[in-house]
């Protein structure tokens, strides 16, 4: 396990890694946060003891309330702006492309870069008091860490335009209605229920979990026909695993399987 960062903390328990962004008062995505987030995430990716990753924010005010506005204020050229956006996208893309499931535990306000980070996670569990939005236009900006792209893919082009062009915030309940989050839970149960979901997934065969991740992520980039062909190949691949043999045998013997991730 790496040394704890100054603004990004890591805890690993029962094969679940909990990454906490801890930069008061709003956990803004400064360059330091992004660097530590990348390092911490990569360590979880490379740790064979980690099966599922949870990302959350410290405190009760914000999951992540956006990028660091002071750092953006210092940008004075087109080249600097593009460099910042592409650098942030590169880090967030690593989360989206992870073969290990990543779940966002959204404990409070989730705006701008925070919403972009949450959308890159594979599932999102939200507090019933959380607020969501892409308010960059209120600062004369546009989303830069993937907001225009992932929001349209998750919630549809029309809703993405509305949120990005108005900068309006929406409630957790509305976020659930439009498909932005998977579940809305009581405020004091966000991390508990997210970890419970992570443990449920971690109890499955790591081979099957990672192949499902690959099938969905890569399939979304292909035509239906190409995606189905890839799914077939991956089904063949999982059929040769020890966990497949154990899972099928356990089903036939009417008992719980004992997966070994082999």
Image (cartoon, rainbow, N blue to C red):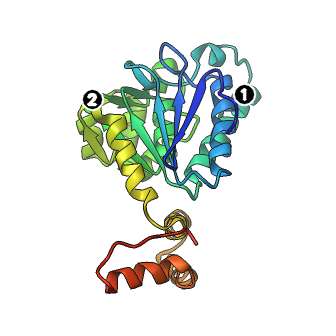
Depth check, mark 1 against mark 2: the one in front is 2
Residue 8 x/y as whole percent: 59, 27
Q: Residues within 10 Å of mark 1 (few under 14, many from 20)?
A: few
Task: Report which residue position mark 1 lands on.
Answer: 78
Q: What secondary structure is found at the residue carrying circle 2?
A: helix
Q: Position of residue 207 (x, y in %)?
A: 55, 69
Q: What distance separates the C-alpha of mark 1 from that of mark 2?
A: 41 Å
Q: Are marks 1 and 2 in contact (CB under 8 Å)?
A: no
Left or right relative to 60: residue 99: right
Image point (42%, 19%), residue name: 59
Q: Say whether residue 144 is visible.
A: yes
Name the foreground residue: 63 vs 52: 52
Q: Is residue 252 left or right of residue 147?
A: left
Q: Earlier in the sequence, mark 1 or mark 2?
A: 1
Q: Residues within 10 Å of mark 2 (few under 14, many from 20)?
A: some
Q: Is residue 234 visible?
A: no
Q: Residue at x 40, y 85 (%)?
A: 249
| Residue at x 32%, y 85% (from the top left corner) | 253
Label 1, secondary structure: give it: helix
Question: Where, by quadrant of the figure, is residue 42 drawn?
Answer: top right
Q: Residue at x 46, y 43 (%)?
A: 119
Q: Quadrant of the C terminus?
A: bottom right
Measured as percent of width and height from the top left, residue 171 is found at 27, 31
Q: Is residue 235 above or below residue 136?
A: below
- Quadrant holding the N terminus: top right
Q: Report which residue position mark 2 lands on.
A: 187
Q: How many marks?
A: 2
């Amino acid at each position: 396990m790496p040394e704890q960062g100054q603004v990004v903390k890591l805890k690993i328990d029962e094969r679940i890694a909990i990454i906490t962004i801890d930069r008061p008062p709003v956990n803004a995505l400064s360059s330091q946060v992004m660097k530590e987030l990348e390092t911490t995430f990569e360590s979880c990716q490379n740790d064979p003891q980690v099966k599922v990753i949870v990302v959350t924010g410290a405190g009760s005010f914000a999951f992540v309330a956006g990028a660091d506005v002071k750092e953006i204020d210092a940008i004075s050229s087109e080249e600097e702006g593009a460099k910042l956006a592409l650098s942030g996208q590169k880090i967030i893309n690593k989360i989206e492309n992870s073969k290990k499931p990543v779940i966002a535990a959204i404990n409070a306000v989730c705006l701008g870069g925070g919403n972009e980070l949450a959308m890159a996670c594979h599932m999102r569990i939200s507090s019933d008091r959380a607020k969501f939005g892409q308010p960059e236009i209120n600062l004369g900006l546009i989303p830069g860490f993937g907001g225009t792209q992932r929001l349209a893919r998750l919630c549809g082009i029309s809703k993405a335009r509305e949120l990005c062009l108005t900068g309006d915030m929406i409630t957790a309940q509305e976020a659930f209605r439009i498909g932005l989050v998977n579940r809305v839970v009581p405020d004091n149960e966000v991390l508990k229920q997210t970890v419970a979901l992570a443990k449920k997934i971690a109890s499955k065969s790591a081979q099957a979990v990672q192949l499902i991740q690959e099938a969905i992520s890569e399939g979304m980039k292909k035509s239906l026909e190409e995606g189905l062909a890839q799914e077939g190949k991956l089904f063949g691949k999982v059929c040769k695993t020890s966990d497949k043999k154990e899972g099928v045998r356990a089903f036939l013997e009417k008992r719980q399987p004992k997966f070994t991730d082999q």
